[in-house]
């Protein structure tokens, strides 16, 4: 019998996203994004990512993301069809071994808002499943043996062995 426990009380400091924030004035930071990142880098990343999203071989995709985007990816980690790493800062993504990044999942390392932008590392442990259409926001840590359900927007850290689901995201533990 599967028992599900919903975690309602969490220590805030453990689950808050680690982001570097910079306030801007004038035009929004997305309009001025090439002041913070080189156009050529973004152009190269977009080409690599868009070709790789449709590539049927997970082994080739793994190799291209490690070598072409400087992502840290463990052995036997697979990106499914249309899974998308961050186009601006993919080098801030670290994924452990034997993970599955599901169909059309997105891993973001940046956020451009109206008056500020935020950048943060994304760390994913070993043996993690990221479901289809999930979105991982910048500054998030996902522990080993965790699961992110399909369609979840991961807005805070997910500890080892827990499941993140829903929007707004909730955590649950299986016993």
Image (cartoon, rainbow, N blue to C red):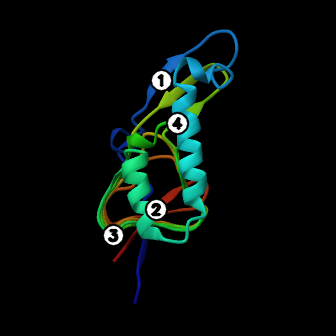
Query: 19 above or below 68?
Result: above
Q: CA distance from mark 4 to mark 1?
A: 16 Å
Image quarter hosting the C terminus = bottom left
Nearest the viewer among 143 and 49 is 49
Q: Is disc 3 placed on a helix, strand or loop?
A: loop
Q: Earlier in the sequence, mark 4 or mark 1?
A: 1
Q: Earlier in the sequence, mark 1 or mark 2?
A: 1
Q: Position of residue 90 (x, y in %)?
A: 45, 43
Name the residue that disc number 2 marks: 61
Q: Is disc 1 placed on a helix, strand or loop?
A: strand
Classed neighbour count for the residue bearing mark 4: other residues with Cα under 10 Å, few (<14), some (14–19), many (≥20): many
Say whether residue 150 is left or right of residue 92: right
Q: Who's the residue at 68% across and 9% down the image?
A: 26
Name the residue that disc number 3 marks: 76
As drawn, the residue found furthest toward the top would be 26
Q: Who's the residue at 39% across and 35% down the image?
A: 18
């Amino acid at each position: 019998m599967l028992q599900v426990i919903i975690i309602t009380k969490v220590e805030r400091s453990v689950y808050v996203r680690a982001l570097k924030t910079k306030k801007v004035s004038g035009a929004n930071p997305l309009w001025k994004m090439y002041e913070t990142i080189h156009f050529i880098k973004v152009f190269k990343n977009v080409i690599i990512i868009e070709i790789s999203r449709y590539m049927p071989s997970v082994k080739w995709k793994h190799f291209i993301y490690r070598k072409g985007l400087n992502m840290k990816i463990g052995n036997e980690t697979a990106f499914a069809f249309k899974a998308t790493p961050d186009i601006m800062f993919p080098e801030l993504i670290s994924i452990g071994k034997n993970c599955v990044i599901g169909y059309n999942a997105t891993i973001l390392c940046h956020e451009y808002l109206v008056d500020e932008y935020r950048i943060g590392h994304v760390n994913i442990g070993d043996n993690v499943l990221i479901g289809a259409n999930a979105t991982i926001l910048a500054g998030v840590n996902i522990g080993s043996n965790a699961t992110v359900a399909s369609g979840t927007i991961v807005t805070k850290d997910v500890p080892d062995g827990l499941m993140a689901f829903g929007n707004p995201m909730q955590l649950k533990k299986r016993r």
